[in-house]
Amino acid sequence: MSTPTPTPISKTIYVTRTGLPLSFTFEWPFRHATSGADFDVLHAAITLENSGGLRALVAVNLSVTLREVLPSLEPKDTEAPIINALRKEVDRKQTEFVKSGKLVPLPFSSRHYSFKLKKWVFGAASDEEITRMIERKVYWQTRLVGGDVWLGDPTEALYLDTSSDHIVEIAAGLAQQGLFTMARRYAAALPALMDQKGRFESEMAVALQQLEDKHAFERG
């Protein structure tokens, strides 16, 4: 029997560690700052999916120090760490989602890179955290976009400080529990997962409320 061909993905959903489903759009390429400052800028929009249009418009400011370790400023070398840096800012409640708003500068700096280890660092995740991320990833990608969900995405492995092989290994265990089927590192959700809508929406609501409360407190 031949292996089914995965459905092409029109949009990728990236979930934060707190359970918020995000998508990203970028205005490539990087441009040198026009203010005379020595940094490069990339405009981006972070959309909070399943929220009725909430988003954050950001100007990713690439520091000189970090630019020196990047092979190039092309998407193939920068998109994954930028997505994860922005996700990390959402995790840290530094990003506010609104219906409309002004462009907010966000640093893309050595805070996310270990010069000692020569690697990106976004925080290691336990197997339990990876399990939750996989479940959320498959649920939200399926619900919001549809099609098969690629679990071999190196962006996810980078975010969780693990390997794609380890993510797929944990996913295989979830497949055995009947949450989804797997073929060639692609997951196809089953009712046992999709019927947990209340759980995933509750996690999202709690995370969003905590983020909004933080920004409301800062505004006084």
Image (spheres, helix red, strand yellow):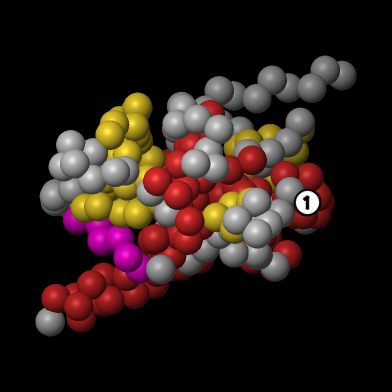
On whether residue 95 falls in the magenta region, the answer is yes
Whether residue 209 sits left or right of residue 157 in the image: it is left
Whether residue 64 sits left or right of residue 168 in the image: it is left
Compared with 170, 188 (above or below) is: above
Image quarter for residue 150? top right
Residues shaded magenta:
93-98
Image quarter for residue 196? bottom right
On whether residue 186 falls in the magenta region, the answer is no
Find residue 34 and report its horizontal and vertical position in percent: 18, 36
Residue 191 in view, yes or no: no
Residue 124 in view, yes or no: yes
Does the magenta stretch mainly form a helix, a strand or a loop? loop
Image quarter for residue 135? bottom right
Whether residue 167 sits left or right of residue 96 in the image: it is right
Residue behind mark 1? 166
> Which of 18 and 204 lies nearest the eye of the viewer?
18
Q: Residue at x 59, y 64 (%)?
A: 123
Check disc 1 and report its element: helix, strand or loop: helix
Q: Which residue is drawn at 52% across and 63% down?
A: 17
Find residue 147 and report its horizontal and vertical position in percent: 55, 31
> Which of 213 and 114 lies nearest the eye of the viewer?
114
Q: Residue at x 82, y 17 (%)?
A: 2
Whether residue 158 sits left or right of residue 176 in the image: it is left
Counting labels gives 1
Q: Residue at x 18, y 48 (%)?
A: 103
> Which of 87 and 35 lies nearest the eye of the viewer?
35
